[in-house]
Image: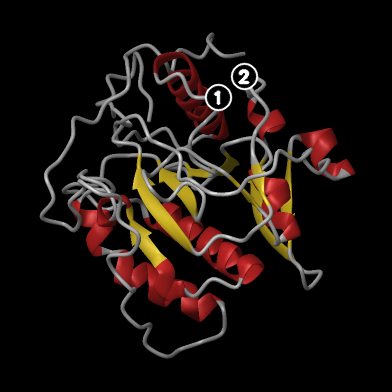
Amino acid sequence: MTSHPSRLSRRDVFSAALALGAATVLPAAASGAARAATGSGRSGRRDGATGPRITDCDGWGAREASEEVVVLDTRPERIIVHHTASANVSDYSRERAHALARAIQTYHMDAQGWIDTGQHFTVSRGAFVLEGRHHSLAALDAGDRLVRGAHCVGQNSVAIGIENEGTYTSEAPPAAQFSALADLCAHVCRQYDVSPSEIYGHRDFNNTACPGDRLYAMLPQLRQDVARRLGSGRPVALPRWPVRLPGGWSAGPAAGSLPEYLPAGLLDPLRGR
């Protein structure tokens, strides 16, 4: 979702209409002491074990949301995978991941006019996992509520959105990034009782090339990898596709593409600090 002096190709995340539904604005649950002190920590599981390490909004230097983030008293039904359509950089550092998160938020708030980052979580090419929209991590830890996002038209109140740094039209994501995505998806499935078969690509619902042909083609492997992490070696059923498509939108890998970019300069390390 972002780019800068690093000559990234950019992505235009088209204005997403938030899905209709009863919503309640709730105060976010406070982060744990360890996360509050360090800005990151292992996401908690309902069974008391630990999930993947996720850097929260404080940890990567997020701005405050411009309005109260809406927290729905419901669980998500599925996961939607995206790519940022930014450069496939070789900088796998934590600093790069944090700069990316700040740039995405800047673009979404200042260019798109959204209240905060659109997606719930981001996975960098260096396999760092970051909270996107405020309070998404607290909701995941609780396992019984969902932050309303702005990542996929018609799905923002029923789906977790995960952005993956890079452009995956002809190139596959780094193995470590793909593994981190599988770890995160497994944790989301475990916390919310979502089936691995309910992992989709953005293009399954909206008229877009996202998450790129290569990453989209890897979704069956992702579903199977997630199932294995959840303790099942059985083949994963095909997703129930398409579902709840808004009127006027085509779906599927043959759908037309939209321009994808982010304005240059957003990854300037001096910005967003």
Q: Depth check: 153 or 47 in front?
A: 153
- The quadrant of the rendering that contains the C terminus is top right
Q: Residue at the location (69% across, 54% down)?
A: 73
Q: Depth check: 262 or 128 in front?
A: 262
**Residue 207's x, y, as percent?**
20, 45
Name the amino acid, label 1: Ile
Q: Residue at the location (46% across, 73% down)?
A: 196
- Extreme residue in the right direction: 33
- Numbered label attached to residue 270: none
Q: Residue at the location (40% across, 36% down)?
A: 17
Q: Marks 1 and 2: CB-CB under 8 Å?
A: yes
71 on left or right of 108: right
136 on left or right of 167: right
Q: CA distance from mark 1 to mark 2?
A: 5 Å
Q: Residues within 10 Å of mark 1 (few under 14, many from 20)?
A: some
- The quadrant of the rendering that contains the N terminus is top left
Chain-order first, disc 1 or disc 2? 2
Colouring style = secondary structure
| Residue 243 to residue 98: above or below | below
Q: Secondary structure at mark 1?
A: loop
| Residue 92 to residue 77: above or below | above
- Numbered label attached to residue 115: 1
- Numbered label attached to residue 66: 2
Name the amino acid, label 2: Ser
**Residue 83's x, y, as percent?**
34, 43
**Residue 187's x, y, as percent?**
60, 64
Q: Secondary structure at mark 2?
A: loop
**Residue 231's x, y, as percent?**
56, 84
